[in-house]
Amino acid sequence: MTKSSWWFIGITLFIALILSIMPLPLELKAFRPDWLALVLIYWTMALPHRVNVGVAWILGFALDILLGTILGVHALAMSIVIYISANNFQKLRNFSIWQQASIIFIFLILYHFVIFWTNRFLIDVSFSIEYLYPALTSSLFWLWLFPVLRGYRRRFKIR
């Protein structure tokens, strides 16, 4: 992998972090897609030998810092989801984009349940269905994000 390839992957992950902390109106805040998880899942499917659980842990930890949440909560949840997607990347690649969106919906429900249960254990929060709204919007955004990232990856010959 060339140096420019690392820069491109890094830029997409940085943009995903920025989108994850960007202010939204209160009406839309509950529906914020999990940008970082989506971009990490894409790169794990495309280049599992380059973007893996270690990258997910570090970026999840950075997300914890940026969001001001308990350190390690997003890192743990992100690592679990990326571990599952990395172990099944060949199967995920062969699915249609609609099937991938459905599976990503399930992955992100797992992501939010891990966050909820970790927070429940540490700070005693109560469950609300709003925890799962981002999984729905993220799976819908996958239908747009996947072709965009794949197009850029092919255009810039990132391997």
Image (cartoon, rainbow, N blue to C red):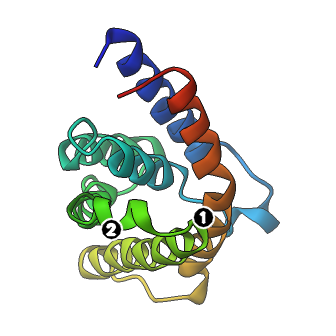
Q: Position of residue 20 (x, y in %)?
A: 56, 47
- If the image is split into quadrants, where does the N terminus sit? top left
Three-letter amino acid code of the residue under disc 1: Ser
Along the line of sight, which residue is nearer the eye, 145 or 81?
A: 145
State the residue at coordinates (70%, 62%): 29
SS at circle 2 = helix
Residue corresponding to mark 2:
91
State the residue at coordinates (69%, 53%): 144
Residue corresponding to mark 1:
138
Query: Where is 126 relative to 104, above or below?
Result: below
Along the line of sight, which residue is nearer the eye, 11 or 75?
A: 11
Q: Position of residue 90 (x, y in %)?
A: 30, 60
Which tag, 1 or 2, sits closer to the chain's start?
A: 2
Q: Quadrant of residue 101?
A: bottom right
State the residue at coordinates (60%, 36%): 151
Q: Is residue 129 left or right of residue 92?
A: right
Q: Position of residue 81 (x, y in %)?
A: 31, 65
